[in-house]
Structure formats: C-alpha cells, structure tokens
Amino acid sequence: MLSMAALTVLGGCNQNVNANALLENAETRTEIINAIAGNHKYMTEFMDAMQTNDHAMQMMQGNQKMMGHMMKDSMMMRKMMQNMMKNGKMMGNMMKMMHEKGMMSEGCIESCMDMMKEKGMMGVGSMKSNGDDHSGHH
C-alpha cells in the first residue's frame, strides 16, 4: 500500500514516471497488477490491450489452464468469438492453427475465407495478406 501511495505522490509531482522502473520492484508490480485486476474499467482496458498485442495473444493461447477456463465460460466464449470475428488476422491465425492440428480441412478453410471476404473481414493484416494464399496451386 505504501508503494501505491508513493506512486500517487510521485506521479503527481512528476508526470514523466518510467513505467518499467516502477514495474522492476516486485512489491510495486504486485500492487499495480492487483489494482488493475480489482477494477472493472482497468481490467477491461487491460484485456483490450492484450487482445490487440500479438505476444499477449500467443501467451494466452499457449496457456492451457487459461484457455480451459475461457472455454467453460459461455459468456466469455461469446465475447471472445465476437471479438475474433472482427479481427481477420486473428481468425486467420486460428484457422491456420486448427488446420495444422487436423481440426479443420483445407476445404473448410477456403469456405471460411470466402465468407470472411464477403463480410469484409479480409483486410490489411489478414491471413491472405501475409502470403499464405495457396489457392493458386490447389
């Protein structure tokens, strides 16, 4: 708690607080994480930031415990699917992973890609734009 008070006082005096320097202190870092996790608005902002960060998404997808909890929560699944449907790149990555693990056939991927194109989801940064278009040789 003392660290949060010091952070507030120092932050009020000097607006150029180096976030990385604050996070180096384990106690301060824990207090900041707990403050974010305990505040709905901050946690929503944090989750939005994680969903737009490739590294964060890879870490979440690699965390079986987290993915298992998300899959059990139907409301979270619905929200996650809605967000993924808005993100062509994320959908492309998910379909590619499913294809690599034998969960989705090439035909199904092509059908999904066509549907995504029709809905305007295949913009810049999508799966097709990064050179993964194999339709010319299938």
Image (tube, rainbow, N blue to C red):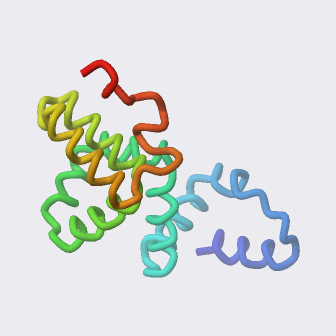
Q: Establish if 136 lies above or below 69.
A: above
Instruction: Give the number of marks.
Output: 0
Q: Position of residue 31 (x, y in %)?
A: 54, 67
Q: Residue at x 72, y 77 (%)?
A: 8
Q: Which quadrant holds the N terminus?
A: bottom right
Of the pair 128 and 28, the residue shown nearer to us: 128
Q: Position of residue 7 (x, y in %)?
A: 71, 71
Q: Please provide percent x and percent y for residue 85.
A: 32, 60
- The structure residue drawn at horizontal position 22% and vertical position 44%, both measured from the top left corner, is 64
Query: Camera-side residue: 133 or 15?
Result: 133
Direction from residue 50 to residue 100 in the image, left or right: left
For the C terminus, the quadrant is top left
Q: Nearer the viewer, residue 114 or 41?
A: 114
Quadrant hosting residue 5: bottom right
Q: Is residue 85 left or right of residue 28?
A: left
Residue found 46% across the figure and 80% down from its top: 39
Instruction: Residue at 73%, 73% (x, y): give it.
Output: 6
Determine whether 80 is above or below 112 in the image.
Answer: below
Single out the residue that lies furthest toward the top.
Answer: 137
Q: Position of residue 77 (x, y in %)?
A: 21, 65
Horizontal side of 15 relative to 126 (left or right) equals: right
